[in-house]
Structures are given as C-alpha cells and as structure tokens.
C-alpha cells in the first residue's frame, strides 16, 4: 500500500461497500450512483433498504469495460 506525501496511508476500502463508500471509490455523486444501481447498471445487491457492493465485483466490472461502466463515465462528465 502506498502512502501520500505526508506518509499517511490511503483509507482502507472495505470488501463490502455502502453507497457512500462506492460513490467515493468511483468518484461519482450518490444520487447518480443510486440511479445507476436501480437501473441495474452497477452490480450491487439491495439488503433491505440499503445497497451493498462487493469491491471485487466492482473491480472486475470496471476492468471488463461493462456497458454500465460507460454510464459511470457519462455521469462523471455531466
């Protein structure tokens, strides 16, 4: 794990992410992420009323260039 210029390590990314965690990880707004998740464009699972996302699944989804991953790019550009 690399450190920043002040020597502090980056925050640990949890294996199971909340919508807040994933929004920070992907650098998109929570509202955009909610819409993408509800439309099935981001691989996630609803647990009760809350969304959960597996980091390994998100990383694989981004690496494969899945159709939903381009939706993230479009949201970032807006």
Image (cartoon, helix red, strand yellow):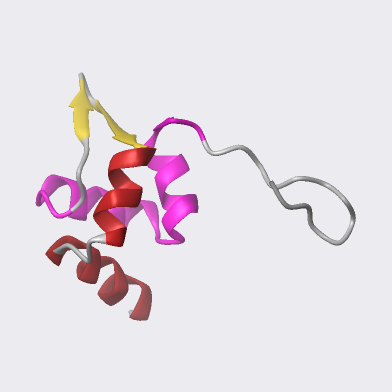
Check the image and name the residue furthest to the bottom: 77
Query: Closest to the observer: 56 or 28?
Result: 56
73 relative position to 66: left or right: right
Looking at the picture, does residue 48 appear above or below residue 32? above
Looking at the picture, does residue 66 appear above or below residue 33? below
Give percent across and percent down for residue 75. 30, 71
Give percent across and percent down for residue 76. 37, 73
78 relative position to 61: left or right: right
Residue range of the region highlighted in magenta in the rendering = 14-41
Residue under the image location 35 percent in, 50 percent down: 59
Give percent across and percent down for residue 56. 35, 40
Check the image and name the residue furthest to the left: 39
Check the image and name the residue furthest to the top: 48
Number of marks: 0
Residue under the image location 9 percent in, 52 percent down: 39
Give percent across and percent down for residue 46. 19, 28
65 relative position to 13: left or right: left
């Amino acid at each position: 794990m690399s450190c920043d210029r002040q020597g502090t390590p980056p925050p640990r990314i949890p294996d199971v992410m909340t919508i807040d965690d994933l929004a920070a990880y992907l650098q998109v707004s929570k509202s955009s992420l909610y819409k993408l998740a509800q439309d099935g464009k981001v691989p996630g699972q609803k647990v009760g009323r809350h969304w959960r996302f597996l980091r390994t699944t998100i990383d694989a989804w981004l690496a494969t260039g899945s159709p939903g991953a381009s939706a993230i790019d479009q949201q970032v550009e807006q």
